[in-house]
Image (spheres, rainbow, N blue to C red):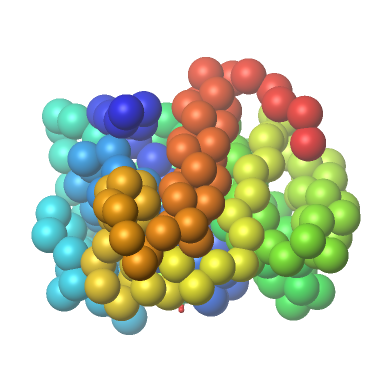
Amino acid sequence: MKILTKLKIGVLNDKGGVGKSAIVQQIALANDLLIIELDPYGNLSTRLDGVTAFEQGEKVVLPKKGGFVVDFGGFAHEQEDAIIASLDVLCVPFTATAEAVETTYNMIARIKHIDIPILFIANRVVKKDEKASISAFKLFSKLLANSANMGYIMESRTIQSAVNNAFNIIEVAKEKGIKGQPFKNMAGQLEQLFKTIKNTKNGEVLDV
Ligand SMILES: Nc1ncnc2c1ncn2[C@@H]1O[C@H](COP(=O)(O)OP(=O)(O)OP(=O)(O)O)[C@@H](O)[C@H]1O
Ligand SMILES: [Mg+2]
């Protein structure tokens, strides 16, 4: 079931290594969305089909028809405000480390004037980090006039494997045999995340 078709989704955080590109990949593959890569150091376009990469300084032209996912990379893009304003929903992955939380907070302060539904995604969560992720989310939310939502992705080697092999985790999880349970578990998390993205886009406020 593809629940995010035709949506315009951004994935943004100045902090490197929080999982932006891995999340962009799974959203795009599972929902038949094009990828717009705005990261001069990114390599999605060399690893996946359906990726348009723009260099720094190049005018970004977004597809007129159909949905897409923007990987903003780990830096402020000159056309960032205009691009964000044209999206349906913005995803902000973060990890609950002091450094990532500080960078994320500063980034949100920069874009909070833009009227866009925001979904924070606590990524690489191990059980003991859940409370820290919720605290960070509450801190981020305070900055925003509009309410925001939060989703989760747990720490899992399936993500690394998906990045290395261009796997669509939801598809791999359907295969029988050795790949098994870890992919099924992550596929369930991703499906839940996609629903949360859709609800956020629709302006629903969800309990964290
Ligand atoms: N939930 C997860 N569990 C395990 N590993 C993860 C998870 N999410 C991301 N990773 C791994 O963390 C690393 C960084 O992820 P990714 O490249 O997607 O981050 P990024 O935010 O795009 O970084 P950059 O800012 O450098 O572009 C990758 O090796 C990825 O496979
Ligand atoms: Mg990246």
Q: Where is residue 140 shown, x and y percent of the image?
A: 77, 49
Of the 4 image quadrants, the one containing the C terminus is: top right
Q: Where is residue 59 shown, x and y percent of the image?
A: 20, 57
- Left-right relation of 133 to 148: right
Task: Using the image, determine if residue 43 lies above or below residue 22.
Answer: below
Question: Which residue is outermost to the bottom?
Answer: 41
Residue 192, quarter of the rendered image = top right
Of the 4 image quadrants, the one containing the N terminus is: top left
The answer, for residue 167, to whether it is visible in the render is: yes
83 or 133, nearer to the observer: 133
Looking at the image, which residue is at 59% across and 20% down?
A: 203
The answer, for residue 71, to whether it is visible in the render is: no
Q: How many marks?
A: 0
Looking at the image, which residue is at 64% across and 43% down?
A: 151
14 or 76, nearer to the observer: 14
193 or 69, nearer to the observer: 193
Q: Where is residue 205 shown, x and y percent of the image?
A: 70, 23
Question: Which residue is outermost to the front?
Answer: 177
Task: Using the image, determine if residue 155 lies above or below residue 189.
Answer: below
Looking at the image, which residue is at 67% across and 36% down?
A: 149
Q: Where is residue 187 shown, x and y percent of the image?
A: 45, 48
Residue 44, quarter of the rendered image = bottom left
Looking at the image, which residue is at 63% across and 19% down?
A: 204
- Left-right relation of 203 to 4: right
